[in-house]
Image (tube, helix red, strand yellow):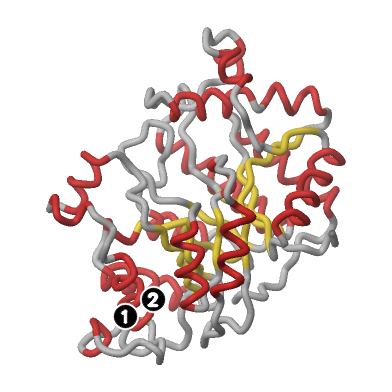
Amino acid sequence: MSESLPLSVLELATVGSGQSTADALAATTRVAQAADRLGYSRLWVAEHHNMPAVASTSPPVLIAHLAAVTRRIRVGSGGVMLPNHAPLVVAEQFALLEALHPGRVDLGIGRAPGTDQHTALALRRDPAALSAEDFPQHLLDLLGLFGDPRVEGGLAERFRATPAPASVPLVVLLGSSGFSAQLAGQLGLPFAFAHHFGGPNVQAAVALYRDSFRASPALERPYTIVTANVLAADTAEEARRLALPGQLMRLSLRLNRLRPVPSLEEAERDPERAAAEAMPSNAIVGDPPGVVAGLRQLAADTGADELMLSASTHGVAERVRSLELVADAWGPAGLEHPAA
């Protein structure tokens, strides 16, 4: 697998133990600027609500800030959860971002709530809206608002995302199932598979996406982004130690006991440490050669066109160091964007 395969970053704006929201967002800014400097292709932030460990509740606001303090990296959502929002609102937000930062904005779209059902109801204000049955139509409305000539009817008959667009954001469909893979293929959109969730279905979903793919005005051939939990340190032993806070966070999510990301010291004495370390994981953790080998294997197994790295640990210095080590060991991370 060629080292020239693009690498990108998924940044969850995590709030660690003893940190404020402002601290978390300052850390995300530092990660974005490092990714920009190191040559990563894009940086995405994700929509989450009512979670003590995640500060990125409003991706468009955070994207505007990150794009303004970086130079060339694409910045986007991984993703915006479309059922939580009116398609016209999302289209207007991202058309405005694209006008401010032309050629640098990605709109990753998901259909999960990004939160629990009670919070989803507070966002959507109607129990009938908790279903995602209308998601395909809302996605078509979104594409139509951006001027996709294939979309007939819907909101685009009466509305536009912005009065005088010179370019549009790149729309990417996110998913961890066959439903999103097939829909992305049928609509000719890039597809991002959430492999960092830990699901086993990445190869089947990517194959379904490619089998379903139809060329579109946005994309002539399938384009797949695969996310992965990745943490590199100077030694494999140090990487495994730094990964412990992230392992405890994944355990807390599984047990629905949400909390900020523990510090390394808290994680090392946590009573659930053994259970967290025993959980099955597809994370790629190690020294730079080991991480690069794991990334190459993931790319070979999935045929990914791009890999997106998410580093889960408490300290921002460790996250930035991981990106530096991977970039140096991988080679040029890929400054071109075949899907753009």
Give the camera-side residue of 61 and 42: 42
- Residue 210: which numbered mark, if any? none
The location of residue 257, given as percent across then percent down, is 38, 23
Vertical position of residue 261 compared to residue 305: above or below: above
Q: Is residue 256 left or right of residue 23?
A: left
10 Å crowding of disc 1: few (<14), some (14-19), many (20+): many
The residue where tag 2 is placed is 95
- Whichever of labels 1 and 2 marks the residue nearer the N terminus, that label is 2
Q: Amino acid at mark 2?
A: Ala
Quadrant into which the N terminus falls? bottom right
The residue where tag 1 is placed is 161
Q: At x 39% / y 76%, what residue is drawn?
A: 95
Vertical position of residue 21 compared to residue 94: above or below: above
Give the camera-side residue of 336 and 317: 336
Q: Is residue 263 left or right of residue 144?
A: right
Q: Is residue 79 left or right of residue 160?
A: right
The number of discs equals 2
The location of residue 298, given as percent across then percent down, is 73, 50
**In which quarter of the view is residue 131 placed?**
bottom left
The location of residue 61, given as percent across then percent down, is 38, 57
Q: Amino acid at mark 1?
A: Ala
Q: Are marks 1 and 2 in contact (CB under 8 Å)?
A: yes
Vertical position of residue 287 compared to residue 145: above or below: above
Quadrant into which the C terminus falls? bottom right
**In which quarter of the view is residue 55 placed?**
top left
Q: At x 76% / y 60%, what residue is drawn?
A: 333
Q: At x 33% / y 42%, what residue is drawn?
A: 115
Q: At x 47% / y 23%, what residue is drawn?
A: 17
